[in-house]
């Protein structure tokens, strides 16, 4: 197994035997080296910071067994009986998505190329890779700047946020690469389910038990959770061969006693206007309790009102235009920050 950085190439065995001068490696890449050095020691736990998918952000511990099992199930799904030879790491390795790229390389003995995290990490890539993990923001940038570079990637896992319809349409035109949307979180040692981007159902991986609480939110138990139940705030619809993700319970809007999923409205709008960035949020209302509003990068409310595809409960009552979108460390649009912003706009004196 080789580790390939921008300014160095070396064998993992040399690293483990202390033959590598880490001073030649950029500081941001030393986490990768330290993680790999710890791996053979069998130290029981690794610390990670959660994003808040199952509650308030916090620090948790994951075992080597959990990380390994998750990586094994992903490789089994993607490669069946074959083995990947080259993996690309272009996510922050301190977060679970990046850490699991390293884990997959370790258990498959694949070469690992490390590229600094950026909006377009494959712009200068000049050799084919069997597998890469990307977030939607990176996908969008690559499509706009250098879509031909996707030919360098055989398989691409996409996680961190839901993939917009216009991106799915563009990726579907690329026949050199297989793209997959993933579902999971730090608490489950990365994704627990996967689907090709053109399919609707997420298919669970490995020995999972899935159930729903009284809100319709998913609970997960298996090796990846250390045999403990993990409660999510994700509303899903279970079906015979998998499940559909419907939205987050903590973003449900209660307008006039009707509970509405903003993500469901966003999907409907994006199917008709795929080039728009839209987030559905709410502001306080004396009569309804909460009133649905739309935040978008380009005016669209008048067009929405002219077409009857949303129910009367789902129709936004106001529209706010925003050119720069707040994002969290994982690259997701920060809904909490957006909600705070739009409510401040609403409360400003006329």
Image (tube, rainbow, N blue to C red):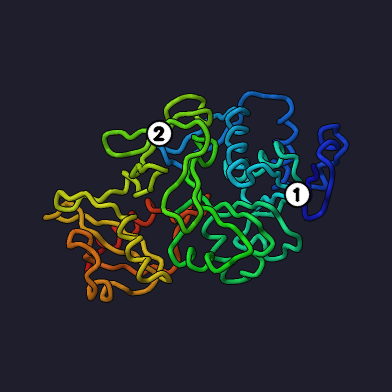
- As drawn, the label of residue 210 is 2
Secondary structure at numbered mark 1: loop
Occupied quadrant, residue 350? bottom left
Q: Position of residue 233 (x, y in %)?
A: 36, 40
Q: Provide the secondary structure element on which disc 2 rests.
A: strand
Res 314 → quadrant: bottom left
**Crowding at mark 2 (Cα within 10 Å: few <14, some 14-19, many 20+):** some
Quadrant where the N terminus sits is top right
Q: Which mark is residue 26?
A: 1
The residue that appears at 52% across and 42% down in the rendered structure is 191
Q: Mark 1 against mark 2, which lies toward the viewer?
A: 2
Q: Is residue 56 left or right of residue 291?
A: right
Q: Position of residue 319 (x, y in %)?
A: 28, 68
- Horizontal relation, residue 332 to residue 133: left or right: left
Q: Closer to the camera, 11 or 292?
A: 11
Query: 209 or 277: nearer the eye?
Result: 209
């Amino acid at each position: 197994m080789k580790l390939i950085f921008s300014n160095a190439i070396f064998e993992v065995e040399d690293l483990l035997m202390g033959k590598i001068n880490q001073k030649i490696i950029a500081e941001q890449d030393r986490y990768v080296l330290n993680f790999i050095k710890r791996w053979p020691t069998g130290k029981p736990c690794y610390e990670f910071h959660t994003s808040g998918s199952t509650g308030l952000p916090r620090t948790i511990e994951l075992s080597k067994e959990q990380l390994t099992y998750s990586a094994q199930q992903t490789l089994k799904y993607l490669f069946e009986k074959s083995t990947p030879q080259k993996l690309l790491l272009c996510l922050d390795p301190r977060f679970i998505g990046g850490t699991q790229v390293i884990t997959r390389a370790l258990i498959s003995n694949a070469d690992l190329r490390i590229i600094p995290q950026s909006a377009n990490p494959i712009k200068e890539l000049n050799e084919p890779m069997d597998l890469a993990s990307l977030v939607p923001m990176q996908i969008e940038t690559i499509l706009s700047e250098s879509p031909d570079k996707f030919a360098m990637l055989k398989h691409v896992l996409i996680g961190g946020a839901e993939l917009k319809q216009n991106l799915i349409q563009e990726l579907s035109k690329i026949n050199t690469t297989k793209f997959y949307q993933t579902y999971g979180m730090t608490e489950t040692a990365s994704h627990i389910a996967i689907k090709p981007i053109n399919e609707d159902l997420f298919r669970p991986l490995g020995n999972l038990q899935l159930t729903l609480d009284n809100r319709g939110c998913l609970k997960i138990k298996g090796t990846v959770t250390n045999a403990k139940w993990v409660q999510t705030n994700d509303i899903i619809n279970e079906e015979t061969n998998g499940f559909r993700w419907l939205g987050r319970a903590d973003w449900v809007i209660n307008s006039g006693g009707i509970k509405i999923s903003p993500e469901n409205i966003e999907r409907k709008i994006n199917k008709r206007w795929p080039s728009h960035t839209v987030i559905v949020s709410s502001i306080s209302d004396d009569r309804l309790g909460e009133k649905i509003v739309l935040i978008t990068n380009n005016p669209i409310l008048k067009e929405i009102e002219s077409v009857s595809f949303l129910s009367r409960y789902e129709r936004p009552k106001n529209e706010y235009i925003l050119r720069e979108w707040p994002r969290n460390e994982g690259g997701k649009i920060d809904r909490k920050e957006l909600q705070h912003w739009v409510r401040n706009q609403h409360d400003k004196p006329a």
